[in-house]
Amino acid sequence: MVITPSRFRNPIGKFRLHRSNECIVCGKCVDMCPVGVHELKAGRVITKNHYRCTGPDCANPCYLACPTGALTVKKNPTFETMGDLRWPPDLIVSTWHMAETGEAPLRGLEYRTGDSGGGFDRLRLLLPSLSSHEMVPLDDEIDIGLELNKRDNSSHKIKIDVPFYGGGMSYGSVSIVTMLSRVRAAAALGTFCSTGEGGYPDELMPYDDHVITQVATGLFGVREDTIQRVRIVEFKYAQGAKPGLGGHLLGDKVTPAVARMREAVVGYPLFSPFPFHSVYSVEDHKKHVDWIKATNPRALISVKVSTPTDVDMVAIGSYHAGAHILHLDGSYGGTGAAPDIAKKNIAMPIEYAVPKAHRFLKEEGVRDKITLIASGGIRTPHDVAKIIALGADGVCTGTAELIALECIRCHNCESGRGCARGIATTDSELMDLMHMDWGTQRIINLFMAWRKELIRILTRLGMKSIQELVGRTDCLVHLDYMEKATVESLSGTRT
Amino acid sequence: MTSKYMIHTQSAPNRLKTLTTSGIIAWEEGCLNCPVCVKDQCVYGVYDNRCLDVRQMIDSIDNQCMNCLRCVQGCPKELIHKSINPEYKALGDSYWTPDIIASLWDQAETGKIPVSGAGYPGPFSGPGFDSMWTDMSEIVRPTRDGIHGREYISTDINIGGAPDHLSFTASGELEDNFPFPAEIPLPIILSLPPIGSWGESTVKGWAMAARELGTFLSLPHDMIKGDLVSLKESLIPVVDNGEPGSLKEMEGFALLEVPWREDWKEIRERIKERNPSTLICWRIPLVKEAAEKVLCLVNSGASAFYLKGTENGRHVDDDTAFIKEAIRSIHVTLVEKGIRDKVTLLVGGGLAMAEHVAKSIICGADGVVIDLPILIALECRMCRRCTKELPCPVEIGRAEPSWVASRVTNLIGAWHNQLLEVMGAMGIRDVRRLRGETGRAMFYEDLDRNTFGSLGTLREGYELE
């Protein structure tokens, strides 16, 4: 863990402090601030780190203690302009806090749920009360790792150290710096990161053991050696944000480097069709899996699908076709560009799909033979715990990593030169806004914070391994189905 | 339809500056005029495009800013702050939200499907149409590729009942003595908006759009005069009482819209007398007894209905009931009686987004009637000043017919493509087969209760996190 502050001059926080000329430079605020907002410099006190201020949540507020009343605290207007209901500004800034410090924010920010009004945001973990006991000390013995190969066969045995890995983001939709930051963080954390459907850049080669290569419908950059180089190969049948629709990389983003990687023409838009035009049945699907097995016999096969009404049938079909990992991508998942109508309406949220698939695989007696990975709207360690309790073994992350790299959810990834913040772009000038070491460390920090939170949750549940949590819906409560009076009695507490 | 139906769209720029979310940039005092000003570095060139002197400190509501916050985060003196544009937030109301209005403007300008980066930003679910999701096909079912034109997806619908069998003459010719239903190439009919300070040229533009699209514009019969007479084939006159005086020029219309009244039988007789071949589409307000009215009319031979809810997509007599449920129950009633194919159900009221077309049809409608979107396409801000006889801030009445026509054509073109996206994902290649396909949709009420209904117990000695 290395403290890794914002790469911009003025980090954005929830509050802003105003210092009037009444300030007598007594230094009291500098001494008392628990988070180092103020700094004494050249005979003046300056408000150096507004963004760290926890406002009224502060245990020791400087603005109340200032002898001359020179300090006032206000909400930062810019804070409110960021994000949306799924990623409210609180979640964005708390993710930044974790990416900077490796710790969950203790005060001032809601870091566990968003404001979408359903699903994860209405589910709560049901934990034994701490009552009069002090905080339970974190248990280092707790295992939050995940065995990805649950089949008894000759394929690789791969255990990841955390119950998540990085979902696919293609070269072209994000910059090489972003890609490398994600892969290097995955290597450091003992997990994996998927290449997405844009080819396998040479820069990733040192991290082959932590790369999942994606075979998607456009087959961009898929070659025999890219399949043979890795331990996990992912078939992307569909993407949660645009299920049933193909991918589309705008011509602007097809730079010479992208075109070379994808074996395409510079400046022309690229379509990744839907579906695989060679797969219209589970038998066709098995043929695909067999093809990979022939090319790389020990590779684990992941099948990434979206969440139609018959997601249970897709799940069992994938199992019988020989998949090791079934990856369900829910409809509220991320994308570099997708029609708004698809993002909102097509296919079901992951919170419904996971229990459905989990139950069905169990009934069919094969649940312990396949790893169920969930993605599509996993934003916080609490989302991870909730979806595992609903029946997943682990999750894929995506947007959370981009937020760690200071994405603000402006939703303009696809326009013009791409991301103005240098994350989802191939524009050389914009790419230079971010350095790989910084990006790597931010993602490591974020996930170290997630790791601690998951261990804390498991400790409170009295579980020794995260696998004990799989399918434990008795550890969850949904606020909409509780008695109104009970919900009201909880108001005021952080539910 | 034998030829491939395509809507040709072309950019029809806004006449005025649009309102956008991007808000006021507050400039604090204390600018150093430093040599590398963040304003020079704006990725989108906003400061350049607006021809602003970078040394100027001005407050501005900005319609070009893309909210990347680079200037906010880069200014060495932290002088720049942003907030959400209050004028944007104040657009419309809780149903016709600022986001819906802005998206309609954008589609009317560009004719393109709204596309954006990053995942869905909105609520998990919501009332009415927001409580359903549509299905997609995966691995085990083929999908269709309509949007890129590789496969043809038909959006044709017929209005009027289909005959249950065909009859032939002795010589093998098709007998033509049954009423042949009207056919439109997309399941959308335009209707005069209930509000708006539009003028004759606006109505002409809407009629031109209807002709361009191959569909109809419905409007009061006494407005059909002057230039509009030549666009007759694309118009549906609304005939209030069937009085002979209003029937003079009824020849040449495929369809009449007649509001339901207690004396509907007499009205029908008056119309039939004058013009026995004209199809009547009965407009029935969406009230609790709407299904009974439909059944009663069907039994006496009616075959086309326009069920109209409120502007906010609710029942006329019950603000808590949504048209979604009403369509489902009327559709199912007709199916159970075995007469669904004898009837065309059009629905309207509160249809605000392309997804509402697909969702209405999944719930059991054959097609939809839209009104306010064709007004919003013309930059209407839904301020409703026109209802208080105050001047229109965007002067809709002054817009040229040709501009009106292209804006509406663009909007419907974008909606049509979005309908193709939804159908393509489901693997359905004919919109007539989408009707009532509730098995290919997911309803919040069922799914949420099935999944989470049992998770409501807070056990003793436990707390929530």
Image: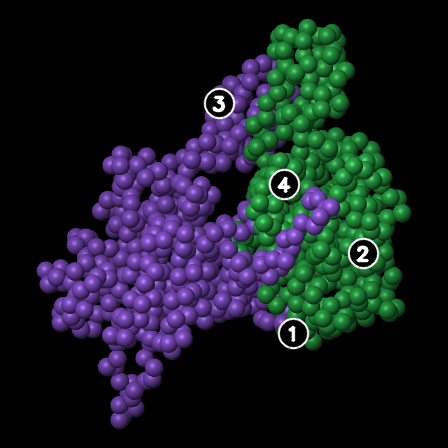
Chain colours: A green, B purple
Whether residue A226 is situated above or below residue A120 in the rendered picture: below
Q: Secondary structure at mark 2?
A: helix
Disc assigned to residue A490: 4
Question: Which residue is at a point 35% across and 50% down the rendered structure image?
Answer: B311
* Residue depth check, mark 4 versus mark 3: number of the one nearer the observer: 4
Question: Which residue is at a point 56% across and 33% down the rendered structure image?
Answer: A81
* Residue type for callout 4: Leu
Q: Earlier in the sequence, mark 1 or mark 2?
A: 1
Q: Chain of mark 3?
A: B
Whether residue B337 is situated above or below residue B462 in the rendered picture: below
Residue A447 in percent (x, y) is at: 77, 43
Mark 1, Cα crowd under 10 Å, few <14 / some 14-19 / many 20+, is some
Return the residue at label 3.
B59
Disc assigned to residue A467: 2
**Mark 1 and mark 3 in contact (Cβ < 8 Å)?**
no
Q: Chain of mark 1?
A: A
How many labels, in total? Answer: 4
Q: Chain of mark 2?
A: A
* Residue depth check, mark 1 versus mark 4: number of the one nearer the observer: 4
Whether residue A303 is situated above or below residue A66 in the rendered picture: below
Residue B357 in percent (x, y) is at: 42, 59
* Residue type for callout 1: Ser
The quadrant in which residue A358 appears is bottom right
Q: Chain of mark 4?
A: A
Q: Earlier in the sequence, mark 1 or mark 4?
A: 1
Disc assigned to residue A281: 1
